Amino acid sequence: MVKKGCQSRPFPHFLTGNLWLKSRCQGGKSMAAFFRGSQNFLQKFNKHVCFANVSSRAMASKTPVGFIGLGNMGSHMAKNLLKHGYPVFASDIFPESCKEIQDLGAQVLDSPAEIADRADRIITMLPSSPNVIEVYTGLKGILKKVKKGSLLIDSSTIDPSVSKKMAKEAEKMGAVFMDAPVSGGVGAASSGKLTFMVGGLEEEFTAVQELLTCMGTNVVYCGEVGTGQAAKICNNMLLAISMIGTAETMNLGIRLGLDPKLLSKILNMSSGCCWSSDTYNPVPGVMEGVPSASNYQGGFGTTLMAKDLGLAQDTATNTKAAIPLGSLSHQIYRVMCARGYAQKDFSSVFQFLREEENQ
């Protein structure tokens, strides 16, 4: 996006936006699922043999989990795994991001490969497709040290085609890759109330669900690898559209002399109510505990929203789906990134609109 002269450039015409062993053994189950099922059977058998040891066996069943990517979302997700009694091996490209989780009891390791050498269940939470590719297939990536039967869960929001590629690469190493992007924002990540959209082998879903319910209240199986990403991309496109609409509506109402808190109250008891208005209002002073109350710091960055809308644009182009409002939202968030809003929360679109009026 251009910085200043962009007003002279009109928004473009509406655009169509731009699975160790074959992952399954005989009978349709993946071998990773078979081994986990056998372990569960033995645990249940031992429960009847020695009831007194049930609690200790339950704790022992919480084998270490690797967690890579300790940003605004990942740090809270890893903390919730610790709260549920899972030993955590953690890693992040920025060492300073590891200090808090280390103080809470996680063991910090230097690389994704080291994580894979120590844990057979790994969760990744990364900013973009290139980051995911590097963390999984790079020189010090997960797949350099991954153990057969490992379960790899990626909660990043990336191109579905990259998820499919990572699943194939993991399959070659005898591991299983599942995509499980999230929705709910930093608040839900902190409180353990995220929604997970899961794609991959259905017989692996129970094992995935065991971990994800430590971090979220809704864990939904969407279908084959990549469908979790598809659901997330659709959700975030709608979120962007509704946030822009809420910002425009609030701004218009204020210009017409309405008190913003009153207008928000009316919207939230009327047909215009949406998450952007009743949970994440973009107008400063209307709600507490949201980015608009702290100069749009924290939350979900404008850069990330622009990235997700780019994914929607690309997948829409590939599937010949018409997304006129999604395309326009993409352009708006790109302009915002070029105008100094890149590191602010995406709800800063309200502030952006106000500044546009003064130019």
Image: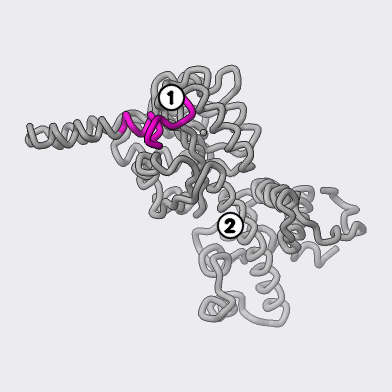
Q: How dense is the environment of label 1, judged by Cα within 10 Å: few (below 14), some, or many (20 and up)?
A: many
Q: Quadrant of residue 234?
A: bottom right
Query: Position of 295 compared to 354: left or right?
Result: left
Above or below — where is 256 with respect to 332? below
Above or below — where is 351 with respect to 73? below
Residue at image x 34%, y 42%?
A: 210
- The foreground one among 140 and 20 is 20
Is 344 contained in the magenta span?
Answer: no
Q: Which residue is mark 2?
A: 235
Q: Which residue is mark 1?
A: 108
Q: Name the colouring of the figure.
A: one colour
Of the residues shown, which amino acid type is indicated by label 1? Val
Q: Which residues are magenta?
A: 21-36
Rendered location of residue 186, percent (x, y): 50, 50
Tell whether label 1 touches label 2 (CB within 8 Å): no
Residue at image x 92%, y 58%?
A: 8
* Disc ID at residue 134: none
